[in-house]
Image (tube, rainbow, N blue to C red):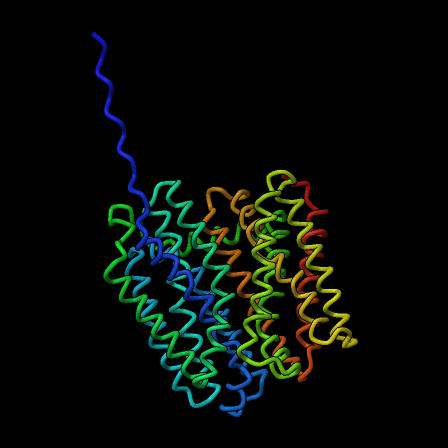
Amino acid sequence: MPSPTPPPAPQPPAPRRSLILLLGSLVMVGPLAIDMYLPSLPDIAADLAAHPGDVQQTITVFLLGFAAGMLVYGPVSDRFGRRPIIAGGLGLFLVASILCAVAEGIGALTAARVLQAIGGGAASALARAVAKDLFSTEGAARVLSLMAMVMAVAPLVAPTIGGQILLVADWRAIFLTLAAFGAAGLLATLTLLPESLPPSARVGIRLLGAFAAYGRILVDRRAQADLVSGSFNSAAMFAYIAGTPFVYIEYFGVPAQWYGTLFGANVVALVIASGLNARYVARFGVRRTTRLAIAVGAVGGAALLAAGLTGFGGLWGIAVPLLLVIGVTAPVAANCTARLMGLFPASAGAASALFGATRFGLGAAASALVGVLHDATPLAMCLVVAGCCFLAFAGRFGLDRLTASGD
């Protein structure tokens, strides 16, 4: 008599739309807090009687807070669970956004931005961990793909939203809008987000072990090529974020509500480049496509620097080269992250966190330099963006030459 057919193995539940939407919204916290208030930077400088360079530092300190948090959130959530860390971070983000809205001086605004970054970083960093905890491989892939789309769309819509708010209110209303977003996220986290890491799966805080892994990655010559080239390539984008509000709105006279359109054109270029990278990376290899993307960014940086030095092309002499520079940042970051995790599969989380912290850390330095060099012309931004592109090119091709690694 034939043996009975065993029952089919239970299938993991499909990702729920409400949970996918919540996780996608959590990922949006960082981009919204960075990009929504960009059109208001000139207004903030005027209202607080602050130098434009000091106002640009509010971007720098936000990036620094984000970078520091990325190194800590993972190990801490491994011990205490994802949900309380996300909720606590959103609570801090809510309070800090209100403090930004009521700031009476640039010092108070800068301090509040640090707290806003630390709080918002928890949600952005741990949403991906929740997806990996809760879903099957296929389900997690779907959710993470949605998050990547949100990360591309959020910078497109955030400056436009900020510009439209400025038509009916002042810059403080933008931070109140961010506070409302944080409050909605906190409420949704407390009522809808399950704890994805059960107590049985939790471990002790492994900060020392995590930092030891960071050290091993930093001294590896192959990893240095990805860290240096990928981070400087991203730093060019953060220098652009810090510089363009003043370059476009104050120098070229672009209305604040139209700033988002110029900003969004670069996001469209970024999405197109990401699609091309996804299509051809398997055919040509990660290393080769990364080198090509960084070379394209360097060409854009050279054209941007020429426009900044000569004034050739006016607004379009600045905006068009930026399409090349900003467009390649997403595929370069994706490829460098993949290579780093491939080099250190047992420390993939540490490799990803270290790359993220390095990107935001150098991005903070680049945005700060734009503020320090600010001279009421596009030149400071052009110099810093082009310099980052050239350093990314030197890091990629120079360090690659010193290693025998390949795909």
Instruction: Please identify the quadrant where the C terminus is shown.
Output: top right
Provide residue 143's location: percent of width, then percent of height.
40, 49
Q: Determine whether 64 is above or below 204 in the image.
A: below
Residue situated furthest top in the rendering: 1
Query: Could you say which is closer to the camera, residue 395 or residue 193?
Result: 193
Q: Position of residue 210 (x, y in %)?
A: 44, 53
Please determine whether, in this image, residue 221 is positioned above or below residue 321.
above
Q: Residue at x 68, y 62 (%)?
A: 389
Which residue is rendered at x = 68% and y = 78% of the image? 378
Picture quadrant where residue 263 is located: bottom right
Relative depth, front residue between 222 and 339: 339
Return the residue nearer the eye: 390 or 158. 158
Residue 270: % across, % down: 58, 58
In the depicted view, which residue is nearer to us: 165 or 335? 165
Total numbered labels: 0
Q: Is residue 353 left or right of residue 375?
A: left
Residue 221 horizontal side relative to residue 347, left or right: right
What is the quadrant of residue 392 in the picture?
Answer: bottom right
Quarter of the figure that contains the N terminus: top left
Where is residue 292? Give x, y as percent.
69, 50
Which residue is at 50% across, 72% downward?
A: 160
Left or right: where 147 falls relative to 257 = left
Relative to 26, does residue 241 appear above or below in the rendering?
Answer: below
